[in-house]
């Protein structure tokens, strides 16, 4: 009888210990762009998200085109990207369940310090084309690459034309490598303000084009599917990012500059204060 009780008590103790173990936090896979990682914002978001929710975030980095492919294939639960046309197209064909705007971070056209060019983006690109000045494109189907192509289109310039091949080059790489190539060639290049602030190998490059509506860069968060149902992990991340995460975005700085504007500050007319400071010689 005592032996039987001991076995029963031992079994009960094992069950109690197992039940007392903390539930392991989920790891949520989120696809996102290089600018979020390279600027340092990703680390701030990851730390705050885990502290607030108890869940870990695994960030799969790539260009917007690649990240949206991962989302549609249900390889990630959500996506933090910056090409609204591609994002809404994915929603329309059923590759994503929901989309919410998150933050803004303006683009810049960078070029050699000695270059005398307009600070308005479209006029600047038209001058580059007229003078056949070298320009390096990412050429990688990223959000930045697509934004650059829209700028050329707005300027009335066909960069696939044979004449453009003398001065227009495609790196086929990410933002950091493309900036390095542009610096080595003393060429012009498009980049987002956050990546530029964090980029260390600036060389002879400096912000030249900071003005124009086409430089507005809006980030959205998309929620994917888990089978036929809305991915609840992705939905959790989206709710956090558009809620408590907004304070993290607002507080994030590089040096003394805030490259990202949260939802509440996205509708600023004209360039963000950070972009204006760049073209007024405050980029350091």
Image: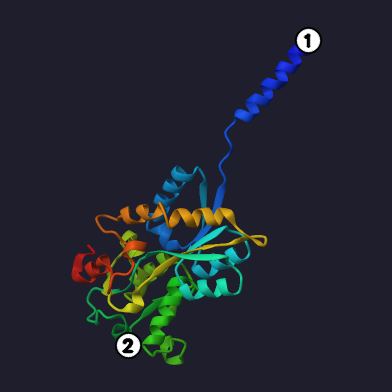
Please identify the quarter of the rendering in which residue 117 is found: bottom left
Q: Residue at x 60, y 28 (%)?
A: 20
Q: Residues within 10 Å of mark 1 (few under 14, many from 20)?
A: few
Say above or below: 255 vs 177.
above
User: Where residue 148 appears, x then y in whole percent?
Assistant: 41, 78
Label 1: element kind: helix
Residue at horizontal 37 percent and vertical 67 percent from the top: 180
Q: Residue at (23%, 70%) from the top-left corner? A: 276
- Return the disc, 2 or 1, that comes first in the chain's sequence: 1
Residue 219 in percent (x, y) is at 42, 66
Q: Position of residue 196 (x, y in %)?
A: 33, 64
Q: What is the crowding at mark 2: few (fewer than 14 residues within 10 Å), some, or many (at least 20)? A: some
In this orientation, which residue lies closer to the viewer: 44 or 224?
A: 224
Answer whether residue 146 is visible to the viewer in this image.
yes
The residue at which mark 2 appears reads as 126
Residue holding disc 1: 3
């Amino acid at each position: 009888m005592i032996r039987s009780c001991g076995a029963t008590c031992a079994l009960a103790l094992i069950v109690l210990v197992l039940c007392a173990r903390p539930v392991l936090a989920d790891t949520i896979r989120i696809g996102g762009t290089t600018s979020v990682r390279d600027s340092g914002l990703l680390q701030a978001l990851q730390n705050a998200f885990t502290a607030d929710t108890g869940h870990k975030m695994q960030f799969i980095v790539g260009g917007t085109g690649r990240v949206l492919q991962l989302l549609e294939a249900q390889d990630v639960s959500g996506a933090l990207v910056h090409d609204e046309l591609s994002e809404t197209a994915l929603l329309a064909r059923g590759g994503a369940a929901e989309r919410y705007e998150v933050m803004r971070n303006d683009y810049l056209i960078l070029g050699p310090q000695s270059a005398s060019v307009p600070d308005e983006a479209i006029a600047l690109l038209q001058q580059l084309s007229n003078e056949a000045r070298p320009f390096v494109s990412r050429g990688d189907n990223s959000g930045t690459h697509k934004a650059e192509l829209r700028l050329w289109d707005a300027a009335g310039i066909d960069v696939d034309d044979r004449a453009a091949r003398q001065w227009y080059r495609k790196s086929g790489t990410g933002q950091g490598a493309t900036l390095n190539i542009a610096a080595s060639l003393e060429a012009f290049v498009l980049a987002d303000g956050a990546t530029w602030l964090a980029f260390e190998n600036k060389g002879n490059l400096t912000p030249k084009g900071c003005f124009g509506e086409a430089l507005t860069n809006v980030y959205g968060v998309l929620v994917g599917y888990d089978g036929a149902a809305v991915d609840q992990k992705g939905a959790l991340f989206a709710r956090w990012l558009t809620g408590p995460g907004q304070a993290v975005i607002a507080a994030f700085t590089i040096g003394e500059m805030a490259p990202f504007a949260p939802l509440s500050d996205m509708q600023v007319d004209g360039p963000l204060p950070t972009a204006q400071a760049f073209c007024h010689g405050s980029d350091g």
